[in-house]
Amino acid sequence: MPQFENTPRGRVVREIIARVHADNLIGRKLKNGELRKKLNEPEWKVPDGYSLSVIEQKHYRMELLEPEQKNSSMVIFQIHGGGYVGRFRNIYRSFAGFYSELGHGIPVLSPDYRVAPEDPYPAALEDVAEAFDWLLENGWSEEKIVVAGDSAGGGLAMALCMYLKDRGRKLPAGIVAMSPWTDLTQSGASYRFNFRKDPVFGKTLDSLIFNRDYIGTNDPTDPYISPLYGNFEGFPPMLIQVGSYEMLLSDSELVAEKAKKAGCKVRLSIYEGMFHVFQMALLVMPESRRAWREVGKFLEIIQQGLPDSHYETA
């Protein structure tokens, strides 16, 4: 299990985030997701050499980012985070650009699935399952699809694979999960020992990770809600990245342990001192740069079908 040291710049960024989230004016709204509903963003500038297509579905829309010189060896199916209450944002469009570049020009499909409280479970799962089928209907086969998600999106990526497996269907080629939310019962030990450390969700019970808007009256141990409680037998290779300061640290550790016992190839990378989805810092700090390089290596392994020895040193 790779563990990466905390750098001085990483500690500074973490401290800034902690101070912002502790601010009495905006901190609570950040933690409980209120600002995610009201966030107005400028129009995202499509990078040179790329096109962005909007695909309207019955209940949601999708965005397909494609380079002009498209590499068809793979496609990324990106499932965004947001605690099941936040919609698609510009940072995920930037993520799509990173995934495409790291995959040497592969397309990226990102569904803006329905969210709670207006549309609780199983709306999100239904939407991503439909979007996955859209890929198959439009020429991509399962062995060319890598599902990538952060936070709730990481958990939803695993839930999607369980949904497909339960129906006797082929699974995608791999999963990239950044700080995945896999246990909506909050039973892991890190919810306690990182309660005061976590700069994003810590020091309060009034936060997204204790919100039941998505679960409603359903059982939180349903594997389609909390993949930790599911069966990982037959799962594709997974790259899981998480920060050591996260309350959700156990979500990654326990899933990795369970998946490995089921015979799944799992690379769990713990970044010392890092916070929830620190990859959003993009190129700002060494930890996020290293994490994205690790993602690039993982995609290369999947693309080229490299042996396990390469996977272990991604």
Image (spheres, rainbow, N blue to C red):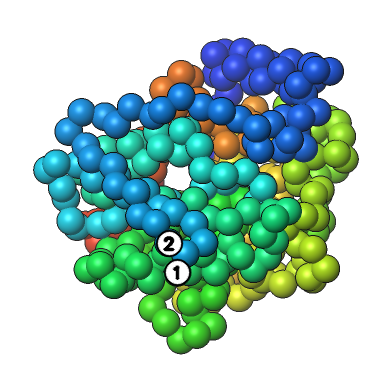
Is residue 104 shown above or below 224? above
Mark positioned earlier in the residue sequence (2 or 1) = 2
SS at badge 1: helix
Residue name at image x 57 percent, y 37 percent: 277
Q: Name the residue under label 1.
A: 130
Say few, some or many: other residues with alpha carbon within 10 Å of mark 2 (under 14 / 14 to 19 / 20 or more): some
Classify residue 175 as left or right of residue 14: left
Residue name at image x 39 percent, y 57 percent: 56
SS at badge 2: loop
Asked where in the image residue 303 lies, by quadrant, the reply is bottom left
Whether pointer 2 and pointer 1 mark residues with C-beta atoms closer than 8 Å, the reply is yes
Q: Name the residue under label 2.
A: 57
The image's mark for residue 78 is none
The percent coordinates of residue 111 (x first, y second) are 45, 54
The percent coordinates of residue 274 (x first, y second) are 62, 30
Q: Can residue 118 be seen in this view?
A: yes
Is residue 35 shown above or below 190? above
Q: How far is mark 2 from mark 1, CA to CA? A: 9 Å
Residue name at image x 24 percent, y 45 percent: 66
Is residue 185 shown above or below 43? below
Is residue 304 shown above or below 50? below
Classify residue 122 as left or right of residue 214: left
